[in-house]
Each structure stands twice: as C-alpha cells, then as structure tokens.
Image (cartoon, rainbow, N blue to C red):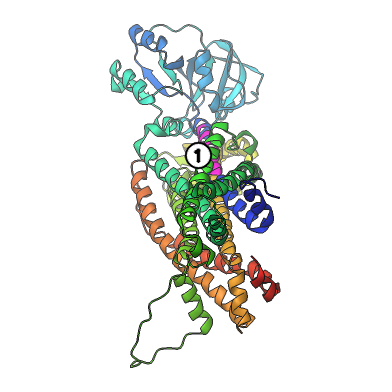
Amino acid sequence: MIDSYKQLSSRYLKGNIKRTILTLVGIVLSVALISTIGLFMKGSQLSQIENIKKRNGFSFHVDISNYDEAILNKIKYNPQIITYGLMSQGKTISLENVAVQMNFADQHAMEFLTYSLLNGHLPNNEHEAAVDSWTLPYINKNLKLGDSFQLNGETYKLVGLLDNREFTQKSKVGRLLTYKRDFAIGEGRILIEINQKANFNEVLDEIKSFTRSEKLVINEELIRVLKPESNSSILAMLVIVVSIVVVATAVVIYNAFQISVVERMKQFGLLRSIGATRKQIRQIVMREASVLAVIAIPIGIVCSILALAALQFIFIMLLESGTSVSFFYIDWQIILISSLITLSAVMASSYYPAFFAGRISPLLAISSRLSIRKESIKKQKKTVLKKPVSFPLTLALKNVKRNKNRYTITILSIIISSVLFITFSSIMNIAFGTKYVNNESTRSDLTIYLQQDHPVNSIDNETILEQLKSLGNVSEVNEQEFSYQVKLKDINQSSETVTDIQQTVGTKHSITTVNHLDENKTRKESALIIKVLVYGFIAVIALIGSLNIINTITISIIIRRKELAALKSIGMSQKDLKKMIIYEALIYGVSGSLQGIFFGCILSYIIYVAASGILKLEWTIPYVACVITFSAALFISYVSVLIPLRKIQQDNIIDVIRED
C-alpha cells in the first residue's frame, strides 16, 4: 500500500537495486574525483612549501639589508608581518687551507634557519655554535657534537651541524652560526615572515615603498607556492584545472541520472496518465537524487581519503625520510566545498531529466517512442558496388544513430575522461620540466676541482685518475674539464673519503673537494615528491575515468535488456548479438576518445600558455598521452560490455520481454 507518491522513489531504488548501485557509483566517482583533487592539491602545496624551505635552508619571505631605525619600526609595527628576526655576519677566520665565516642570529632568525640544520640543534646562547659539517676536520679532527672548541679566542660548544652547501665548499669558506641577543641599529639584515592571511602583493609593495630595490631580497620561490593566487600564471592554471574538474563532475552525474530517467519514461507516462502533475514527477526524481546523494557523498569522501592514504604509504616506502614529509592532509573546508558542489550537481542533473519527463505526452511516454526517431528512407542508385559490411556492424551503426540521446550521454563520459587524462598528463610534463626533477649536479657524490692556474698534463691526469680509483670507497670516476666526478660505494663514509683524497691527490695538486651528498639528497627528495604526486594524481584520474566509462556503458547496455531479448526472439544468434554490442562499444570508444583527444590538446595548449609565465617550455602535441587515451578507451569500452553480456546470455527471453 502506497500512502504517498513520494514513496515511489524508495520503492524504485529498492526494486531496481542493480541500476541504483550503478547510479550510486557514478555519484561516488564524481565526489571522489573533486575531493581527491582538492585534497591532493592542498596536501601537495603544503609538502612543496616544506620542501622548498628545506632545499633553500631557510623559511623567511623577505630579506632587508642596510636598514635604519625608521625601516625597523615600520617592520616592527606592521600588523601584516607576523614576525621578524635579525642576522649579521662577523669576521672570516682563517684555518688550515680554509676559512670560517662567523654568523650571528637572534631567536626569531634562528627559527627561520632550522631548515639548514643537518643534525643536533641550533644555538640557544652565545657559547653554543653550529658549523658546516665539512669544516669539522679543519677546526678539530676529533670534534663531535657536544664537544667544546676554541675559535678566534672564544670557546663554543658544538650543538649542531649545518648541511653542506656547494657554494661554501667551492669558496672554501664554511659557516659558523651562533646566537646574539642585541643588534645595533643597521647591523646585519632583517628577516621577515609575512602573515599568510595577508595580501602578499600589497605587503611587498608597501615594503618596496620605503626600501630601495638593492636592499631587498624576496623569497619568490616560496611565496609562489605559498600564495599561488598572487601569480597570474599559477592562478590561470588553477582556474583551468578546477573548471575542468567541476564540468567533469557535473557531466558524470548528469549521465548517470539521464540514463536512469530515460529508461523510466514509460513509468512517468503511466503516472501522468493517472493524474500525477509535472511537479510531482519532478519531486519523485529529486527525492531519489537526494537519497542517492546523501548515501554517495560520504562514501566518495571516504574513498578519496583512502586513495590519499594509499599514495602517502607508497611515498613513505619510496622516500628514505618520507615520514617527515606528508601530503596527506584533510581539509574539512575542501571536503565541505566538494560535497556542496556534488550535491548541487546532483540536484541540477536530476532536475533537467525530471523536467523533461514532466512535459512529455503520457501516451508517447507509455509507447516508448520518445527516444526513437524514424529515419528518412533514402533511395540509392545501385550503380556502384558497395563493400559488404557484416550484419552485426550494420545493426550497431543503426542503433547508435537511432538513439542520439543515449549516444551523446555515453560518449560524454569517454570525452570527459580523455580530456582529464590528457590535461593532467600535460601538467605532469610541466612538473617534470622543472629544474628540481632534471638536475645535473645529482649525478655525482663528490666533485674534485683543480685550480685552473696550474694546468695538469696528461701524465698527471692519468695519475690522479689512478689515485682516485685506488681508493676503497670510490666506485666510479668521470673526468671533466678541470674537475673529476666521483661516485661512492658507501655515502656514510664520505668524510673519510674526502680526507683520503686530500692526503693522496691534495698533496701534489691544489684541489677543492665539494661534497654533494646533502644537496643531492634534498634535490632527489624534491624530484621524488614531484614524481609521486604527479604519478599518483594521474593514477587517481585514470582510475576514476576508467570506472566512469565502465559504469556509463554498463548502464546503457543493462537498460536495453528487453530490446536485446527481442532481437534474440526473432532469430538473432548469441554470437551476432555479442558482436553487435561489442561494435557499439568500440564505436563509443573511437568517437569519444577522438573528440576527447581534440579538446584535451586544446586545453593542454592553454595550460602551457598559462605556465609560460613560470617556466620556459615549448608546447608539442602530447602524442604519447593521445595514443594511451585512444588505446585505453577502446580497451575499457570492450571490457565494459563483457559483464552485462554475461548476464544477458543467461537471461530467459520470455521473462525479459514480459518485464514491466
């Protein structure tokens, strides 16, 4: 007994559980897509911020030198500046063959410099110091963390080791960092951190207004990632990506509901014939949409979080220090926005089919003639012999032509999935074009530079090569102009190897040994972070796109069970029926993928134009992505019909035809 027409919604959802599940899957995929992209972008932004700070060795946003009291007061009392610190350089103290540059910083400046710390902690008072690790043998051969040492008449306790930087080793001037409480006006530099909620462009313009350009150093790399909206190129790319995702979400949900509603035109016609109003028809469908949205949105959010957790686990497995870097970040604001966008898309996508169902004639709806259009008969002259086409293929082409609505809905899913894959493949190429992924200095662990004012003849060159190769920890040596690139067997023994090189080669030649291990580790981590983020992102897009295509094609086949049973009843063999359905799927795959490739290439070019303000890249047609898209669309379309075909083969023809 039905007390209200609204109960028809729940009755339909329960009575057609398979179709309900497929529609539910479409909504789940949509909300998972948009929430995954949102959370992924937020998490990757945070990981990139930390990575840039670690790679540069500091976290301040602006550096001002040669300041006066007026400038200091403007910085101090600026509400948009969250904190500032003072740092200065002292004497350069000469040691054996090298020198050490004294550096002083107050407590706030120390907080900006924690990212250059390799081991231990930064100084907390004037009697503690942190030094470059490569300078330890020159200060004291047996110096370790916790030991005391004397330098320039002062006694310091070694509390921290700074990472080895290439510029300090090349210049043979190491860094010693110690604490200083009070600075004279104008001494050293002001290190500034801007409030993240502030408008960075306005704050930077204000700082530039009372300082000269030569006094100002802006950490543009960090600000670009921290505030992507402050850069027009990054903002344009974000707008394009978000727009693609939102449109894709709306189309995916529309496809699921349109297919479901078109199949039920006869039911809506029956309801209209017994007195149901247009508004009531709309409310039935909207109620179904609401129920499905309430169920699907939480499931989609959970799937999104699980996908990010899986990628984070892979990231930790690949990266040695992966536990300290995370892009797994749950932002409830992003989840709420994703849910609202999906809910709006569900309501809008279900309203149009319901509105269309409410306007149709009950008699036409009952007769199921709405989606079938009579073709005009074209008389053809039989003057040219035509190549025979198989009957299943001919029937497949006619099925595609006679139902334009179903054809459009089905290929839209393939187009959207193809566009997403090609677009984000272009973003992947842009990411891989950055200097952090392709960096030449990561090829060697040590570099030995010879002074150019003392040229080395071929005999000495062979001697140096033999001496380097004879060292036990050296695995490979590559000769370059005035330098030698050295690969180590055990990177943990790098300090001992540097000492051995100095005692062998350094006794006869003036050399400078640069240890790349610390910088290489940071660069490799940067490259791996980018690769994991990009490949993981592409994997999520490919998975969701594939499931969307499978879901759409599966629904379009299942709702035609009665039609297919009728074909079998008039003598069509199971083999020909299977061929016909496979041909239809391949037609969908070819048509959808080609259109998707066309629009994907256009969007790819637009993204490259937007990125030209950040990187100098030359756009080329993404042939690899296009080939993958075309091949994957055909394969997925073929696989999509195998499951419903197995069900159709087991159907009883009479029972299916008698179904209401």
Closest to the observer, 485 or 525: 525
Start-end of magenta stretch: 35-49
Q: Residue at x 50, y 39 (%)?
A: 508
Task: Report the predominant secondary structure element of the magenta stretch.
Answer: helix
Q: Residues within 10 Å of mark 1 (few under 14, many from 20)?
A: few
Q: Amino acid at mark 1?
A: Lys
Above or below, 264 against 192 in this view is below
**The C terminus, quarter of image:** bottom right
- In the rendered structure, does residue 48 fall within the stretch colored magenta? yes
| Residue 207 image offset from top left, x and y in percent | 33, 18
- Residue drawn at (43%, 74%), measured in percent from left and top? 374
Q: Is residue 204 magenta?
A: no
Q: Secondary structure at mark 1?
A: loop
Question: Picture coordinates of residue 206 (x, y %)?
Answer: 32, 18
Describe residue 581's horizontal placement relative to residue 13 as left or right. Answer: left
Where in the figure is residue 602, as x and y percent of width and height?
36, 55
Dividing the picture into quarters, in which one does residue 76 lie?
Answer: top left
- The residue lying toward the viewer, choosing from 468 and 577, is 577
- Residue found at x 55% / y 66%: 637
- Height in image: 293 above or below 51? below
Above or below residue 605? Residue 188 is above
For label 1, the residue is 508
